Image (spheres, rainbow, N blue to C red):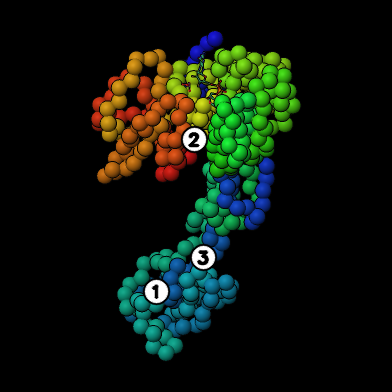
Amino acid sequence: MRILPFDDAWMAIQSLSAPLPPEWIEVWQATATKRRIAQDVVSAIDLPPFDRAMMDGFAIAASDLNAMEPLFIRGAVAAGDPAPITLANGDAVRVRTGAMVPSGAAAVVRQEWVDVQGETIRLLQRVRPNESIQRRGDDVRRGAPLIGAGLPLDGQTIAVLRAAGVTKVPIHRACRIAILVTGSELRTGKQPLATGQVYAASDAFLAASLSEMGAIVVDIVYLPDDFQKIRDEIERRIGAVDCILMTGGASVGDTDYAQRAIASIPGDLPIAVSRIWMRPGSPLVVRRIDTTNVFAMSGNPAACFVQFHSLILPAIRRMMGDYSACPFPYRARLMEPIRLKPLKHVRLHRAIASWQDGILTAKAQVQQSSGSISGLASTNALIRLDEDQYVPGDTVPLSFTRGLGAP
Ligand SMILES: Nc1nc2c(c(=O)[nH]1)N[C@H]1C(S)=C(S)[C@@H](COP(=O)(O)OP(=O)(O)OC[C@H]3O[C@@H](n4cnc5c(N)ncnc54)[C@H](O)[C@@H]3O)O[C@H]1N2
Ligand code: MOO
């Protein structure tokens, strides 16, 4: 069996994970999601759509920017009204913030800068051309680039789309995922454990994390360690879902059927990854069959967590149109020494990251066994350890698994 270096496995998995095709949705019905905009979008209108006042005050003509003599108030324009008046020399038109300025207006002088006397105003200071006017199309012109592909459809982009009169936007389809959980020892539900049983937990982690990132968990199926059943359940989902995430049975034991089941299904591509020089999470089987990416992950909760955050979540993000994923994008300063036994594996340790005086620091969790789950509750980052020895102050690559900086 070929064991891949972590970075080769990352590339292999990313290259199998092409972005899903887009679907068009109505901007006015859109709510913020983690889904990504699939194509560049252009503005449908000039923005702002008219020359508009940025202050409450008076629109004045170019010849009157330095006027010493009084200007006559010829009318008023409220926000939302057309401005039918054309400004002539010596005129002033009262405008509200957001109102259309009359044609011929060279500037809006805010009301604090004038002395109002009956039907006239007197300028208290010189006014610069275009003062307090935002010209039509100044923000963006009709047909000009507005939003680049790959940005999320969230409050920020929805606001821009609405303002620019865009009614429909293409977004990448949410990834549809089935979770197949194997392990005859697993118990789901609140009944007490029988001898030899453990409560299923890795699957709960996956389901919650997938929903959080905007993927759709189509179903979660619990299976005994039975080759034929596992194979059948994989095969009938090929082409029907975008990803199958399996847990358990990814290793080499005689009841670890994941790899054999995945390999036995006909398809053009061979298994791309079956084991990685990383710990925990070394056994990870990956194969694309038809249009479905099949991942067989370790059932060990910590190994499953590490595989998900370091390799699988970035792949699903890419399928959902986020091209920005890169492994361990931060560098953090270690707070404590780390001593590991020499191994060829990259170690991905669960850690607690925090900012101290603007510097990102990390402290590895004490418990790093792949079978231990309790530290996950307080973990907010993974650190990548390529060496065996670290002293405090050394920096290591880090990615957040939750909170500030998490994807
Ligand atoms: N002879 C060898 N044995 C093992 C090797 C090896 O190279 N040679 N690799 C070890 C490594 S590393 C890992 S990691 C595990 C991988 O295990 P599997 O993916 O085959 O998973 P299981 O054996 O099914 O389960 C491992 C462990 O996790 C518990 N588990 C399983 N599913 C869940 C779940 N949904 N929630 C909570 N806990 C779960 C399960 O009861 C086991 O205790 O293999 C090593 N063995
Ligand atoms: O790869 Mo396993 O998760 O170390 O025990």
Q: Is residue 242 above or below residue 163?
A: above
To which residue does mark 2 refer?
324
Q: Residue at x 62, y 20 (%)?
A: 258
Which mark is nearer the camera, 2 or 1?
A: 2
> Cβ of disc 3 within 8 Å of ligand 1?
no
Label 3 and label 1: CA atoms lie apart by: 16 Å
Q: Residue furthest bottom?
A: 118
- Give whichever of 92, 361 is nearer the camera: 361
On the picture, is 101 further left or further right than 65? right
Which mark is nearer the camera, 3 or 1?
A: 1
Q: Which mark is residue 9?
A: none
On the picture, is 277 further left or further right than 258? left
To which residue does mark 3 refer?
51
Q: Amino acid at mark 2?
A: Ser
Which mark is nearer the camera, 2 or 3?
A: 2
Q: Is residue 16 visible?
A: no
On the picture, is 340 further left or further right than 160? left
- Give whichever of 342, 90 is nearer the camera: 342
To which residue does mark 1 refer?
110
Q: Amino acid at mark 1?
A: Arg
Q: Is residue 335 visible?
A: yes
Label 2 and label 1: CA atoms lie apart by: 45 Å
- Give whichever of 237, 395 is nearer the camera: 237
